[in-house]
């Protein structure tokens, strides 16, 4: 039996660089004027490429999809350089300030647009959405479950290993107190942790090849949504920068530092 | 008084500190009702806590990632008329509550620290560098309950003990919810080794080691046991295979917010700091006086952890006498 083609959609996000200072703006939103491809999103991309490379007889396409401001094109372009076959960018001013609820509404429509437009030679494709374990700045980790609920897809989160079989994906994940081997059928949304693989770096040849790969940009209207469909459910009322931690007392060990630490802990009532 | 629904994805022989804390957060808001997904035997004696009125159970235990857990939650919300649903921000609870928010067409706030009587949620953002407050857009006229997941360690444990006291056994309401068929199948489950030490994310004290341990965590383990602490590590130490990956504290690992964090042989790069900089007090030991961790340490020792930590243990034991 010939396996059905598989369309893997990898969600990638353009996020403020965690190595630099990140801040909220006056509107109570994270400042997104500069960014990088989220490190956590390199893992699902690598996972998708490994699945494709391990099944040369099966028609598998890897698409990268991002939602974000105009600058987010650098995230999908990097995804193309790393190895995605094509890329899609959803940008719309009505998505500024989207909460998890609104983000999952928009991404559901975007995933359906991407899968609906794709044509495959070897039959009707199944699809698999791969995501990182969380976004680097929001850190909620709630998007995969919300997206799956909306798509009517199965969901498995925090995968540490993936193995594609003919009609299902076998996933190793850690539940709270146990390790699980879980088999999931398509369509599915699977999030992967940073333990799942070692992401590759794009080489010069891949960077040149990426320039010829298709990048499709769309707005909310292009995916059949209007502003009222993506009104957030949660409103941020206040944001306050924490005062930065300052250095306290630093001593050099002169043979009694262990005792001095314990004295400090006792003084601070931490014992 | 309003009704509050608390969700436990699994319930063991006793409430965990994080579960007690959730009950304390909920009890401050109204009458508490608890939905339990996975359990063994009769879970009600464990939930005999003052303020807990009723317990919702599925017909059979539903271990995550069972999707019928979302049905259990949806039915429990309808039964309880809750104005807010609270759960933990751990993976399985977060997944179920995120799906519930879609079903109910309501807002989700994930990883919260606290919630006020008027359902304004406070949380730490951008790896602890900001504190935000937020609420439902429809807070004035909510059609559906707000869904909130919480990180542990936001209420002092002594205060939790005064808020969560033994009470009568709650009423049990078994809801017509059964496991789903097909789609996601758990083929094998392996219990992870249960450490006698407190869980990292919930521990009040954390002892963490990095490259400077040279691969030997024995002194840190001894210190952790002396302090009743959880044991953590930097990514350099977990990547080197010196300790299991679950122990990684940092941006891509566990975020901890203990009363006391003792960092030993960790340089304190941005990724590590993101996982621990909201700790109450930070003590750092490092051979390199330029280590970044000293910029945020309340007490720092430039020295060799292999000498300093054994001396700490000796002094702690001497004081205990």
Image (cartoon, coloured by chain):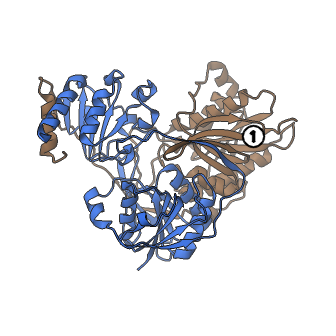
x%, y% of residue B30? 40, 74
Q: Secondary structure at mark 1?
A: strand
Residue in the image at 78% along x and 49% along y: A116
| Residue A131 can be seen in this image | no
Residue in the image at 45% along x and 50% along y: A30
Q: Colour of chain B?
A: blue
Horizontal relation, residue A79 to residue B169: left or right: right
The residue lying furthest to the bottom in this view is B1
Q: Is residue A113 above or below residue B304?
A: below
Q: Colour of chain A?
A: brown
Q: Is residue B6 above or below residue B198?
A: below
x%, y% of residue B217? 33, 27
x%, y% of residue B184? 67, 49
- Number of residues whose C-alpha sits closer than 10 Å to that of mark 1, classed few (under 14), some (14–19) or many (20 or more): many
- Residue at the spot of label 1: A7
x%, y% of residue A97? 52, 56
Position of the N terminus of chain B, as image quadrant, is bottom left
């Amino acid at each position: 039996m010939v396996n059905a083609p598989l369309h893997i959609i990898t969600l990638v996000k353009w996020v403020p660089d965690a190595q630099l200072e990140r801040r909220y703006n006056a509107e109570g939103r994270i400042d997104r004027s500069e960014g990088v491809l989220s490190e956590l999103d390199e893992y699902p991309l690598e996972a998708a490429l490994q699945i494709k490379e391990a099944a040369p007889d099966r028609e598998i396409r890897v698409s990268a999809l991002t939602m974000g401001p105009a600058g987010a094109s650098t995230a999908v372009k990097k995804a193309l350089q790393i190895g995605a076959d094509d890329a899609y960018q959803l940008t719309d001013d009505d998505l500024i300030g989207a909460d998890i609820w609104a983000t999952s509404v928009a991404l559901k429509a975007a995933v359906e647009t991407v899968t609906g437009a794709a044509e495959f030679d070897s039959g009707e494709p199944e699809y698999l959405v791969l995501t990182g374990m969380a976004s680097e700045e929001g850190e909620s980790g709630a998007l995969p479950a919300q997206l799956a609920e909306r798509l009517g897809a199965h969901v498995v989160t925090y995968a540490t290993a993936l193995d594609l079989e003919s009609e299902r994906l076998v996933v190793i994940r850690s539940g709270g107190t146990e390790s699980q081997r879980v088999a999931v059928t398509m369509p599915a949304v699977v999030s992967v942790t940073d333990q799942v693989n070692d992401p590759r770096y794009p080489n010069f040849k891949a960077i040149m090849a990426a320039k010829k790969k298709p990048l499709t940009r769309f707005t909310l209207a292009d995916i059949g949504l209007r502003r009222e469909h993506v009104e957030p459910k949660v409103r941020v009322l206040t944001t306050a920068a924490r005062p930065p931690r300052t250095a306290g007392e630093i001593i050099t060990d002169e043979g009694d530092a262990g005792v001095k630490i314990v004295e400090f802990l006792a003084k601070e009532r931490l014992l | 008084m309003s009704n509050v629904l608390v969700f436990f994805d699994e319930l063991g022989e006793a409430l965990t500190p994080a579960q007690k804390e959730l009950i304390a957060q909920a009890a401050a808001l109204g009458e508490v009702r608890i939905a339990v997904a996975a359990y063994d035997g009769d879970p009600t004696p464990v939930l005999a806590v003052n303020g807990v009125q009723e317990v919702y159970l599925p017909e059979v235990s539903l271990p995550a990632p069972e999707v019928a857990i979302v049905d259990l939650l949806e039915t429990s919300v309808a039964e309880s008329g809750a104005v807010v649903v609270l759960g933990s921000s751990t993976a399985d609870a977060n997944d179920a509550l995120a799906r519930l928010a879609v079903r109910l067409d309501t807002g989700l706030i994930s990883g919260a620290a606290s919630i006020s009587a008027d359902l304004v949620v406070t949380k730490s953002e951008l790896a602890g560098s900001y504190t935000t407050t937020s609420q439902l857009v429809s807070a004035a006229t909510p059609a559906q309950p707000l869904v909130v997941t919480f990180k542990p360690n936001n209420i002092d444990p002594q205060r939790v003990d005064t808020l969560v006291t033994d009470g009568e056994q709650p009423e049990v309401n078994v809801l017509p919810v059964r496991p789903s068929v097909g789609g996601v199948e758990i083929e094998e489950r392996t219990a992870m080794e249960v450490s006698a030490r407190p869980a990292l994310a919930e521990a009040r004290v954390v002892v963490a080691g990095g490259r400077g341990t040279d691969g030997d965590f024995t002194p840190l383990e001894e210190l952790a046991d002396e302090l009743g602490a959880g044991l953590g590590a930097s990514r350099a130490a977990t990547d080197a295979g010196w300790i299991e990956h679950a122990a990684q504290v940092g941006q891509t690992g566990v975020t901890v917010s203990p009363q006391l964090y003792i960092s030993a042989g960790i340089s304190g790069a941005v990724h590590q700091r993101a996982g621990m900089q909201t700790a109450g007090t930070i003590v750092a030991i490092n051979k390199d006086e330029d280590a970044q961790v000293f910029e945020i340490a309340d007490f720092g020792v430039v020295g060799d952890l292999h000498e300093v930590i054994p001396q700490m243990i000796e002094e702690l034991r001497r004081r205990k006498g």
